Amino acid sequence: MRVPLSWLKEYVDIDVPVDELAEKSTLAGLEVENIEYIGVPMPDSERRRKGLKPDDPVTGDGHIVWDRQKIFVGQILESRKHPNADRLILATVDYGADTPMTIITGAPNLKPGDRGQKVAFATIGAILIDPYAEHFKTMRLKAGKIRGITSEGMACSERELGISDEHEGILILPDDAPVGTALADYLGDVIFDIAVTPNMIRIASIIGVAREVAAITGAPLHIPLPTWQTADPPAWDFCDVRIEDPDLCYRFTATLIHDVQVKESPFWMQHRLKLMGQRPISNLVDVTNYVMFEWGKPLHAFDYDKLLARARSIGDDKVTIIVRRATDGEKFTTLDGVERTLDSDTLMICDAVGAVGIGGVMGGLETEVSDTSRRVLLESATFNFINIRRTATQQKLPSEAAYRFSRGVPSFLDPIGNIRGAQLIADLGEGIISSGIVEDYPHPQEVLCVPVTAAEVQRVLGIQLRSDEIIAILQRLDFETRLEGETIWATVPQYRLDITITADLLEEIARIYGYDRIPVTMLADTLPPQRHNWPVEQEERIRDILIGAGLQETINYSLTTIANHARLYPDHPHQAPAPDQFITLANPLSQEREVMRRSMVVSALEDLQRNLRHSDRLANFEIGLVYLPEAGDGVLPKEERRLCISMTGPRDPGTWLGSDREAMDFYDLKGVLEVLFEYLGADDVVYDPAQVSYCGPRCARIMVDGAEVGVMGELHPRVRQAYELPQQPVMVADIALDPLLPLVTHATHVRTFSEFPPVKEDIALLVDEAIPAGVVEALIRQTGGALLSAVHLFDVYRGKGIPAGKKSLAYSLTFQAPNKTLTDKDTAKLRRKIVGRLQRELGAELRQA
């Protein structure tokens, strides 16, 4: 929310420096994210914070300081055609000096014969913004000769002054601008950019900020309620209002303004709207925006004669506004010219013929005001904020009005907005206001009284305040209070929709008292015992292990699409989950985020799809949840913790020293998993051949202690193509953590190093092709017992000399005893024992050299 200091000062007397006001506001919950200085000097503290020199004319954010000795309010005394140029004007300008100055300008909004216009006038040496530079750049004004005539000054545009990007003509000031006054004193301003949190929507207006500043600083507040001048006949002779869905529209008010002249808004309104970041359009549109920024009350203006023509088309001589739900599939064209399809949860503003606007979001094209509008029906209404938020999101129609409505606007502001808006339209458009307000108000806004005590303040906030001090703080916030015994009853102002319970009052007391004044206290009780949270600790342990193995953690969206899940089933699409097996969002933000994921592999492949455009190598992992409705309790889905690993690209990142650029394969992924399980302390890990829909040449089922915990393998080529991934091997592993983690040890087991030398021997075995190497290794370890300290498969051979259906597995065995040096006889005995068991149980044969 942009807040011009000049506008704020109309409602609250501010006598503290700008930087001090920003600090106090931020500490009280109004976070000032940025301060713009337009034409006025920046405090030294702010200059130091931004790294600017003391004499630097730049204030940052595209603004400059207007030199009080060189930039003034001037007045055109005479303008005539340049004798040597058809498109240039010689203008004589009075700027408060003893002698007026003649300058040369080509501004299209100044013509020969013009006089009396007030302008922003700069003299030689003034620092201005270069309007033709591609990026922000300043320039120093110098004297120049154009077609034989010297010009020693300049009438400035808004862009040259840093007010806006407007550069089509010079800035024309109001007629009452004082000639000779430094422009910084007349037009300079400070803009606070304040973050509006969802519970602070009351500060999305100048008056809302003024109330807060008055409470924070103790400065006097003066906010007069708007008044108007009306004339008969009354508005209800021209219009009726009927709310058919009071759960979505709490109040609807309307006023009528006749004989309006549509034209440009005056300078003061246009300037304020520009400072707010709003482009001026016409007096009718500008008034609705101005009231929204001033009071926080969005308005909408209809062309009454267009509404009346619609009513007469069905035989009515009076407009009836009807607020109702849309019908499913109803079509409506909004102001932006887009035809929209609606559903039954969309609130519509209608007449007897049909829809004329989407409530709280955008009006309709058919009844919009235009340059020919003469009668204006002004709407001020209050809606269900959740419904407005949903509709604005669904229809992709963000706006300043929807921003406020979707966070809550109080009903009591409706007549205030109508009166203020109607009078401004009448003043600026020379119109006449019909007396009275037409309204339907089925559910009047509730007036709340909330209790609080000094004891509760001390218990929750840790500060001792007397009842009279608490009352003083609440009264600064516009609460009416009464004291009954020890209880203070606070009547909540009607513009404060965020105050409903005692805790809300305590927050307000803390804000105004000052968070920085609340004393620091140490815990007076004994520290609670620290207990392990094993699931969280195990997850962190997995992260540490995988990062140590060279992988990078990713955090992907839990939201995806049904179509992306279906891509995992290239050969059997009928096996893909049906739509009713997903948790589907009622109002997704985009088509790519419409259901909760059932598989972590989908998120991993989406991540690869995005990031492989920028890198040829990725090795990632994610720990997250999948959502399985059929496994839930009938109300909520089962949320299953899983680990997903994805690897693709060269084995090593490229370096100037050289690296292994061969593509990662199945065994790279298996090596990472072996490291993971080893450091987790998992026993009896086996990788059994398996078939999974999304895996291709190689795929394995991961078994730990006989229980299946996941799958790993190379991505199926058709799945890779479906996800538009490069033509390179992609490895994925999907592991369920809930069944895995109970099988791993919480403690790390260590043993002393043997002081005796190891004995290393190699054996080569012929086994059937179908026997996994992991099964062979497991039997070797079991048979070798404690004296077999290490087993390593170092060769797999198929080919010449190996019978068909067989393969050769070569293992390196390390024998070592903790208490003696093993002899050849000891190791030979163990070797015979191992080979014998392999022969009996697997039919293995010892391969001869």
Image (spheres, helix red, strand yellow):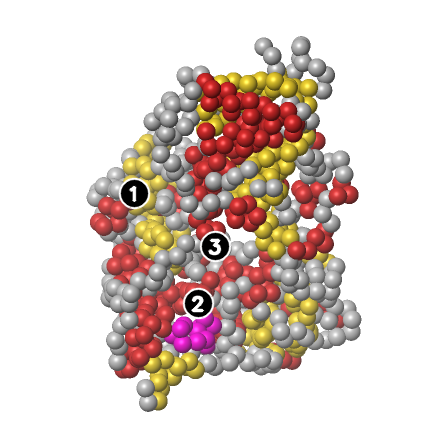
Q: Residue at x 41, y 42 (%)?
A: 748
The answer to whether mark 1 and mark 3 are in CB contact below 8 A is no
Q: Residue at x 75, y 43 (%)?
A: 575
Q: Which residues are magenta?
A: 493-505
The residue identified by callout 1 is: 58
Q: Residue at x 46, y 29 (%)?
A: 787
Task: Give the left or right position of residue 113, taking residue 650 as reference.
Answer: left
Q: Which mark is residue 202?
A: 2
Q: Residue at x 74, y 62 (%)?
A: 328
Is residue 809 at all visible to an observer of this figure? yes
Task: Give the left or right position of residue 120, taking residue 793 as reference.
Answer: left
Q: Which residue type carries mark 1?
A: Val
The residue identified by callout 3 is: 278
Q: In the depicted view, which residue is nearer to us: 102 or 42? A: 42
Query: Callout 2: few (<14), some (14-19), or many (20+) C-alpha neighbours within 10 Å?
Result: many
Locate residue 767, reporting x and y percent: 65, 22
**2 or 1: mark nearer the eye:** 2
Query: What secondary structure characterizes most of the magenta part?
Result: loop
